[in-house]
Image: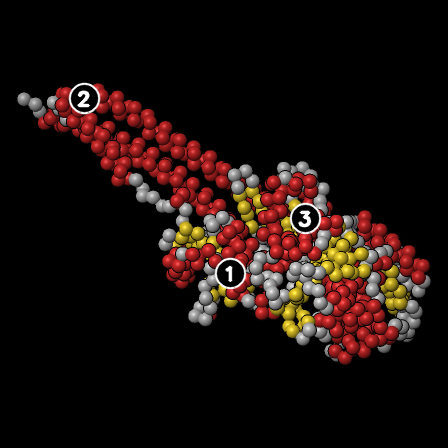
Amino acid sequence: MKTGTEKIQIVFRYAFGLLSPVIISLAIAFAALAFYNYLQQQDRDKKLQVLEERAELTLATVMSRLTFADQFTWYGNRLSSEVERHGPASFSAEVLNARIEKHFPKGFIGKDSKTWAFLVNDKSVKALTGGMLESSRLRITEKLTTGLLEFANNPDLNLSQINQNEKLVKTILGPNSAPLHLGRTREGRLTPVVFEGNSCFIYWRQFRQANQVFAVMISFIPTTAVTDTNFSLRHIATRMFNDSQNRLAVAFVPVPELADALPVVLPDQFDKDPTYREHIKSLLSGLKSNQAVSATASSTKKICEFSDHLFMSDMTSIDVPYDTVVFAPVPGALQKTGSGITPVTTCTVGFWLLMFIYFYYKTGRAGLPLAVAFRILFVFSGMLPIVLMIALAHGLIEESHSTSLDELRRENTEKLSRINERSDNLKQLFGYNISQAINEFELQRLLTTNSRQDAEKAYEIIRKHLEKMELALDYIYIFVPGGKSELFMHDQRRYQNAKTIMDLFGPATYKINQKYAKFSNIPEINLSASQKNFYNILDGFGNNFLEEVFMHSYEKEIAMKFGDKSADYFYTVAFSEKGLIKSYAGFAANSERLFRNFLARELDSLNASDSTIFLAAEELANSEFTIFPFKKMNALNSQIGRNAMNFITRCRSSLFEKYLTDRNHMYIFSPLIKQSSYASGC
């Protein structure tokens, strides 16, 4: 008779043979399932990140082409590129008409618009007519074109010539048209004017080859078209849907305060399926509350999954009462699937149930023979750590790859950010090196003799010293009490601008000299006629305004901006001898010229020994966005280079870094905040 212990052993062996293979195989199956789910989640996260990057890029592109004026400028640049690529030999009214129709979609240059084109030869202009090109008012528009060309291409116009030219243009475009500003800084951009008594916007563009103008186009666009927000938003939404090959769509949702007054703007393609359009509108209306929930759950995700769609939203601008939403149906690759535990458990248990039935049929006992159970135990026990090791190894490899990409992104973003940070030092370096040169070369004597020859010699010494420091000095102006006021520069093309600035600083110097004269016997500053005019205007501001203007730059570097031009750096010094003021000297340089020299050095340095290509782009005076010249420019002729330039162009209006990753490359955009006309990337 068997004892209790023996019975327990028999039950244990029976249970072991019956359950051990089931339990271990379930453990292996669950481990494999967990590994598979992990891989699926990793793959989903990667695809979601790619989609997020592309959604951000779409948002950035929308921001750069948001308004009718932005879109008109973009289409105008495309037109100009093709016209200039073919040159003057093939230019005619028929060709221009065809290219306008090709590059400007319907609604931009409509029947209410008026367009003229002119051939330019030796500063003479000849009208082209036919098609959409006007054949009336040619005399007036020829004069207008001549005036704009003169402003744009002749920086040496004196005040009398500027006034004469402005008077002519104002008779055509109204008293508030700001002709000098229109000619020099508004080429390629819509600008409000009054033409023939009607409020409208002017667009003018020069076509060049080898830096020579061969043609000009001028269009007047009705104000009603330019200010039609619904048209411009619907147009960019339709355009972006086409450009993404119907993968990503853009919608414009009214801000909450105007939700009842303004419609949701969707791409034109959605009109073909009213049911889907209404479905999207209902999702957009419920998106705000869903985003609040998502933000609470995960503050790191920029993309929001709501119902059967993915959404990413951002505000537009202060003057556009809409938020931008990029959306797409959840792709099949991102569809969430079940965990698979139930089918795995069912299949595993079912398999062993069949095995048990088989052995029961052969041996008359349920379960596996002990010898077979042990063999399976050893095999499965060896497989389990292997499965776990494979899972861990894959996880480490993926984490290492992800870390490497993050590190690469961080390093290159920091390099681009340092360009922005170091550009801030240019102003301080400008003032420091002027002060150093004055002391090092003992230039006070040359700058206080009231001799033009001595002062010019001092200017050349300082200018060459700054050039060695890879800086610049455009001009200096000197005021000598009781003596002559002098202006010195190396590039005489800057004379008119420098003379105007000197005339503005003259009254401030005159006023501060009066203050000093109360305490010591020094003569007055002699002002020119234009400086006296400025003094009469500025002295009326009161509250020590003129003295503060002088002291603002006294022995410290400042940046001042006049109009739409880039800022100039200024540094002012008063030279004294035995307690008496002998002269006042102001030093000036254009900040953009210093920045361009600095940017070229930085790009060449970054590209010297790195496989990464660093580049920058700039907005030209005619609104075109083009590559900034650097030594490795030929690399941009490749598809990778074109992709990088296209990426930077699309992100140009963004204030934040943007990233785009494809199978083999990573693209980074970094805005240059201090110089808004420039952007950098790699």
Q: Name the residue under label 2.
A: 369
User: Residue, x 69% and y 64% (percent of image)?
Assistant: 134
Image depth: mark 3 or mark 1 in front:
1
Residue 554 horizontal/vertical position (percent) = 78, 65
* Earlier-in-chain disc, 3 versus 2: 2
Q: What residue type is labelled 3?
A: Ile
Residue 234: mark in rendering = 1
Location of residue 6 (image quadrant): top left
Label 3: which residue? 627
Q: Which residue is drawn at 65% across and 61% down?
A: 132
Q: Give left or right: position of 266 versus 500.
A: left
Quadrant of the frame with the C terminus: top right
**Residue 639: mark:** none
Q: Residues within 10 Å of mark 1 (few under 14, many from 20)?
A: some
In percent of width and height, residue 96 lies at: 67, 55
Quadrant location, the N terminus: top left
- Whole-angstrom CA distance, mark 3 to mark 2, is 78 Å
Amino acid type of the residue tagged 2 in the rendering: Pro
Residue 506 percent location from the top left of the image: 83, 70
Q: Does residue 132 show up? A: yes
Residue 296 visible here: no
Q: Could you say which quadrant of the image residue 499 lies in?
A: bottom right
**In this image, 478 relative to 676: left or right?**
right
Task: Tell me which numbered mark, 3 or 1, is placed earlier along the sequence.
Answer: 1
Q: What distance separates the C-alpha of mark 2 from that of mark 1?
A: 75 Å
Helix, strand, or loop for circle 3? strand
